[in-house]
Amino acid sequence: MKKNNPWIRKKKNVKFASKKRQFRILFKFVITLVLLVGVTYGGHRLFKHLEIFSLKKIEIQGDPKALSREKIIALSQVKLGTNLFELKIQNIKEHLKDHPYFKSVSVQRRFPHTLIFHLQEYLPEFVLNAGHLYYVDAEGHIFKDITNTKDDRDFVVLSGFDSDEVKEKSEQLMESVKSAAELKKTFQQFPFSTPLGLSEIHFEKNIGFTLYTEKKKYSIKVGLKEFSEKFNKLAEIWPKFEKMDGGVSLIDLNYPGKILMKM
């Protein structure tokens, strides 16, 4: 009669004990997961019926100016008294993004009873005239058609752009509009910008930009690039030129090392 090897019996017992421990760990994990899901689901349903989580306050951050507080809340379609857990944040964001002035929108819950809107908006800096009239911000973003609206139009005009390009928002158009925005910023950094004013920036392909002053009768040709260098040339002669500018109809800054004037 064969005797069982004690070492083999010990090895079998160790394997059995190991599998038993693994089973207990797995069983505990499954039970814990089931309880956690149950508590979460049940807790979520419970929270939906607790009055403490009813919406009592809406904070609007970012200092938006395009719409009043009341209109922003109406646009969001959120009603006070709604349980915070029932609010669909993504839907609220989509409602707010429907307004053309809003560049970015975030919506957050602050428990127990507050909802926070953080809004970053476009602010009009120009009116683009290309068949239709459009608002353009200081970075060159075209964001609203104001042709058939009563929106304020007392801004610097951008002209010379093709209406089809505006509708398609072609890459070339967007680059040119951004250059016009940069041109205005550069112009305003020089002392002559205040006495001259600026009413219009006109664009011509292959020729560039021409500024039409608001307080004087002449225009200033600045081309397509090197705006700061060209305005520096004008700044050098400005004190003298300001005293004798009568009769000037055009200033051309496109010639290296000199300024041409047309009387």
Image (cartoon, rainbow, N blue to C red):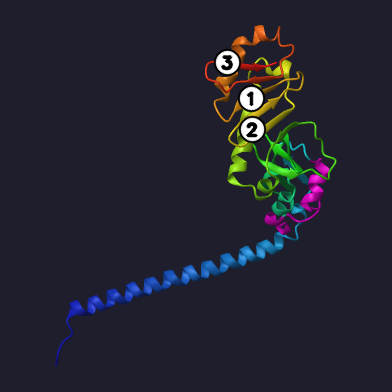
Residue 253 in the figure: left or right of residue 98: left
Residues 76 and 217: in front is: 217
Whether residue 12 is situated above or below residue 237 in the rendered picture: below
Q: Label 3, label 1: how many angstroms apart (C-alpha)?
A: 13 Å
Residue 28 drawn at (x, y percent): 47, 69
Q: Which residue is mark 2?
A: 180
Q: Label 2, label 1: how many angstroms apart (C-alpha)?
A: 13 Å
Which residue of the protein is positioned furthest toward the left in this rendering? 1
Pointers 3 and 1 in contact (CB under 8 A)?
no
The local crowd at label 3, few if under 14, some if 14 to 19, many if 20 or more residues have their Cα within 10 Å, is: some
Q: Which residue is mark 1?
A: 221
The stretch of residues the image draws in magenta is 67-91
Residues 132 and 81: in front is: 132
Tell which circle, 2 or 1, labels the residue nearer the N-terminal end.
Answer: 2
Asked where in the image residue 48 lies, by quadrant, the reply is: bottom right
Q: Mark 1 is on which residue type?
A: Lys
Q: Residue 233 has which mark?
A: 3
